[in-house]
Amino acid sequence: MTTSARPEGARLAAAERPSRVVVEGVSPDVDQGRFPAKRTVGEKAVVEADVYAEGHDAVTAVLRWRPESAPEWTEVPMEPLGNDRWRAAFTPSALEPHRYTVEGWVDAFRTWRAGLAKKVAAQQVEAVDLLVGAELVEAAAGRAQAAQAARLRAAAAALRGGEPIAVRVGTALDEEVALLMARHADRSGAGRLGRELVLDVERERARYGAWYELFPRSAAAEPGRHGTLRDVAARLPYVAGMGFDVIYLPPLHPIGCSHRKGRNNASVAEPGDVGSPWAIGGPEGGHTALHPELGTMDDLRWLVARARELGLELALDLAFQCSPDHPWVKEHPEWFRRRPDGSVQYAENPPKKYQDIYPLDFETPRWRELWQALLGVVAFWAAEGVRIFRVDNPHTKPFRFWEWLIAEARRAHPDLVFLAEAFTRPKVMHQLGKVGFSQSYTYFTWRNTKWELTEYLRELTKTGVKDFFRPSFWPNTPDILPEPLQWGGRAMFQSRLVLAATLSASYGIYGPAYEQMEARAREAGAEEYLDSEKYEVRHWDLEADSLRDFIGRVNRIRRENPALHANDSLAFHRIENEQLIAYSKSTDDRSDQLLVVVNLDPHHVQSGWLELPLEPLGIAPGEPYQVHDLLGGGRYFWHGVRNYVEIDPRAAPAQIFRIRRRLRTERDFDYFL
Amino acid sequence: MTTSARPEGARLAAAERPSRVVVEGVSPDVDQGRFPAKRTVGEKAVVEADVYAEGHDAVTAVLRWRPESAPEWTEVPMEPLGNDRWRAAFTPSALEPHRYTVEGWVDAFRTWRAGLAKKVAAQQVEAVDLLVGAELVEAAAGRAQAAQAARLRAAAAALRGGEPIAVRVGTALDEEVALLMARHADRSGAGRLGRELVLDVERERARYGAWYELFPRSAAAEPGRHGTLRDVAARLPYVAGMGFDVIYLPPLHPIGCSHRKGRNNASVAEPGDVGSPWAIGGPEGGHTALHPELGTMDDLRWLVARARELGLELALDLAFQCSPDHPWVKEHPEWFRRRPDGSVQYAENPPKKYQDIYPLDFETPRWRELWQALLGVVAFWAAEGVRIFRVDNPHTKPFRFWEWLIAEARRAHPDLVFLAEAFTRPKVMHQLGKVGFSQSYTYFTWRNTKWELTEYLRELTKTGVKDFFRPSFWPNTPDILPEPLQWGGRAMFQSRLVLAATLSASYGIYGPAYEQMEARAREAGAEEYLDSEKYEVRHWDLEADSLRDFIGRVNRIRRENPALHANDSLAFHRIENEQLIAYSKSTDDRSDQLLVVVNLDPHHVQSGWLELPLEPLGIAPGEPYQVHDLLGGGRYFWHGVRNYVEIDPRAAPAQIFRIRRRLRTERDFDYFL
């Protein structure tokens, strides 16, 4: 057996006696400290750990935490949960990484005191028992200061002193002495986790927010004109009126002409075709330039400011790829992969070819310069006041690149938020969360049935995934018109929106396609939109039939109910109908408790008996309670665990109930009725 | 964001481009490498890991392993299991720690080759595609030697050469070229786990064995005499005849007189009372001395040798505590805790006092000397040929002490086996496994119902626990006469034995109390034996009614069926009767497949329909098979998934079926019938 086989234990360290206390199984802990866990400012971090020693001596455990910039640790006593598991919590208040760790020690005084109490009960106390305690108290006095030291010395003297044993036992079991002894415990043999864990603390928008995506070039008020950033500014009240928090714009940069795609992704563009905004770069510039038809940097600054006035925040797109006309292709040919014939390697996924896109070569020998230039892109837009980035296809760039880029960017601007647009394999999506993305697109887009939704949300909210992967639920995107939206009509658009907006604290839609219920696919079986805005300018008549008011109501419910600002409390409830899904969310203090019931069937009335466990809601058995449908306005008195629910999708396919308790007095009844 | 927040990724290392490949989630891995995983010589270690890169390039993963003493790594290609999970295995053949780790890299040639194959199918291949491949092959030639380099250079030339594209494609997709390219892959950008994991390799007895415990002083052939080691030697054929592998003896040392306990744990001994063997130490010596009435060191040596001749191995007890008369109390007073009145602190668990026992103070300032002395005890008996130790109450001594002691002892004698006699909280029991105990007593002793057994075995065999905690199932011990044995009669003794012997590869009984079905408790509600051998000499009439033959049959079945030598394959099967429990075990190659059905009700015939999934057994739907009850001798033809089972506990409360397949020919039928 060599030293390294059991790195800590097999050989004994030169100096100190090893600790008796084991600290392990700490949560949150992402890959044993390799990555930070995520929280937002003001969001409680509940920390648990296994802390124990051999035998039956009393153990004390503390959580230690500090903001990275603070020199001093704060200590919080941990509560024993049974089975050697302990828990405490802290709430980060600063926008910076926080560190935390756990420490535990065998508490000789508490052990002695508990034994003495048993001996008292058995009338077995001997003078020598009290002398053992006196020695412990004297030792603590040596670790204490001034008044507390004096108080402890007095207690030790009393334990030794000439009073009858019964009196001295009183000192031994005195609560104040116990408190002082806890404060000055002998921690020389403490066990420690052996590493500090990091909490990545972001601002609230990393966790909670409603996003609205639109194509600026389609934002002109009148048909036939290429929209501009000024047009987007004019559209802001419409977006803010629906209650969104973030307006996200696809790339604003010059669009390449070489191999430009035509309408509906035709491989050859017709004259006048505008191309895809993701084919970035032309003679006018690349990732730090604006498409001339969209406007100027001044227009952008005005848009950023105008959005802020309306309570909206602008999110831009980071798509780290180039059109063949991007200035970098000439200025930095070494950032691209060359084929043996000297041509630049375009993107391909054989047999498909994307000749309008040159991928950047993240493995080029000049990778440092390239990576630095890409960080420069982020810095450029951040300097213009942009603080949110939706990142295009991050799963095709190295993880370590993102880990570095996000850390560096947030060192300069800790309030940056990055959304990963990755629709790929589960472990790749998770790794992007681990390396620093604030939130990520998810599989929600394709999770439709009750079983699919329940299983997926369990993974997202009830496993370790919740500590590093924050979901953003999108019922549609410019790339994805999910099949159910193609046939499900208004009720399907409504139910998918309610699911996204209430299951996930962050969600978004691509509009006006969504609120106008655009349902036409390019061809049968495809998820691509017909006449997609990715390849052409569209005009949207905002006065047409729309879900605008419905969406506004849902977003208002989100804003007014903090239960919807996080996902941890999510609980699904039994309802005997596969077409009805029911779940609740609540705040820690139960002051806000919502129950959502959604009819997944867009065509038929569905009903069932809902089972709502009352104890977690703090409702006593037999206590009546009211449920108030914030969406439809209905109010119902419910009793007990099982209550009847019926949803007609033609009215609205969902009910969002606020659960109102405390129906104890006449006045309460008056108030609620 | 500081460097340390994301230790590996946030800041870039000075020299190398970071790898694109993530290696994580390796199993087995006990606490991220803090502790080794356990295997025995010849036992396969299946290693799995998540290995992946961003994007869709082909990734190759290998398992690397070596015995600690070997300088060179062996590499095994890992198989992809889907979802970015990979698997490979190695089988340690040497009795020493083995190291293993996982490495993966993006395989440019495989990526290129797969893309080319798709282009071939789409009739899209261009000359430049082949030149890309030629560059990769030339680079590999530079990494290869002699003939292989020449072969690769020839392939590169063929890819570049003047032949028609169709011919050059043949070279590109050539299997031999693919093999050579795999052998000389560019691993410069490989991702590595970043640490080496350790496999603690023990001998087979650490995993598999049947133990028999007896009190030497009760081993005299005739009543009224204090038994000796020579008497134990005379008892060996009896024990070997029942098919046991290990004979374990409680402490053989001098027993203290001070505060000696009397019969049935009386607090005061009567004259002539022999005391508890665990009150170790008297004027004749301590942990390296033999009790004079048991015999001499020569007798012990003879016993060790005689046992070996009979295929038995001797296990001794390590009880690291002292009677007040132990020589160390005088020679090393600093190894004991003193009370303020100068007296030595005896063991206590208020209000209980154990004045016959002085615990050693593992935290004494002289702890190094004490620990070394205890290692000396192990070394002393190991020098006498003892290789198995049953450790008394390890959960009252520091974990780090055991970690150090076991590692040091096994450095001298890698074939040492340590059994932890810990009946305590789950995490403490687990930690003892982690720090090095080969196996451990378990909660089996109190798991009686089908639900209890199923849940407990799931934890032991289907979770990470199996990698560090090897169970030893004991239906009784000198300390525990479980309540069901007090009322369940012969059938209960039989069923508990079959459960222990077939659910766990290691098990043991305390005899002759077990085979003679000793069922008298000291008092109602107690688990202590009446007239316990812990405090007095007992005489057992070996000719009395006994389970001797039954136990012999069960142990023979164990020896003859390798399926019972491990626990990993354990699977429980549905049977519609809570009193019937059914499970199977099989070898990796399915050459040995056993099905065990136990009637947990000792009083009534129980029957039910058993559901046996056929696919894991390799039985085709519709294929008849035979089950042969190795215990009762019955043979049955079964068909399909559901078959009827009926067990009369008066005959035997269990059936141990060998499942016999391949009933394909007349000859097979003859053979089986």
Image (cartoon, coloured by chain):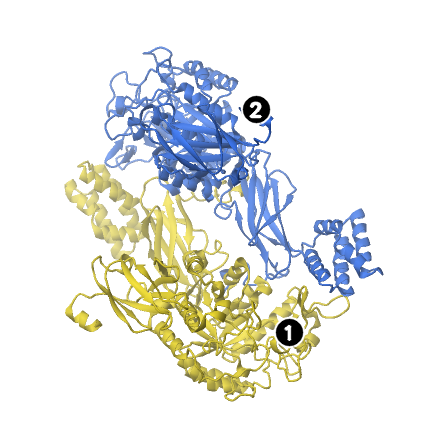
Chain colours: A yellow, B blue
Place of residue A523 in the rendered image (x, y in percent of width and height, measured from the top left): 58, 71
Note whether B539 is above or below A399 in the view shown.
Answer: above
**Could you say which is closer to the camera, residue B373 or residue A328?**
A328
Is A434 drawn above or below residue B196 in the view shown?
below
Q: Give the number of the mark in front: 2 or 1.
A: 2
Q: Give coordinates of residue B584: x percent, y percent.
A: 47, 35
- Residue at image position (29%, 27%) is B486
Q: Is the residue marked by circle 2 packed among few (<14), some (14-19), or many (20+) residues within 10 Å?
A: few
Which residue is more in the foreground, B638 or A366? B638
Is residue B60 or residue B265 the one in the foreground? B60
Please state which amino acid type lies under the numbered disc 2.
Tyr
Question: Disc number at residue A322?
Answer: 1
Q: Give me the chain letter of mark 1.
A: A
Instruction: Give the quadrant of residue A20.
Output: top left
Q: Are marks 2 and 1 in contact (CB under 8 Å)?
A: no
Q: In the figure, is residue B622 to the left or right of A639?
A: right
C-alpha separation, residue under disc 2 versus residue under disc 1 = 74 Å
Name which residue type carries label 1.
Cys
Q: Is residue B319 visible?
A: no
Viewer can see residue B513: yes
Image quadrant of residue B125?
bottom right
Q: Residue at x 45, y 74 (%)?
A: A211
- Residue A276: x and y in percent read 60, 77
Q: Which residue is mark 2?
A: B671
Subunit ID for the residue under disc 2 = B
SS for tag 2?
Answer: helix
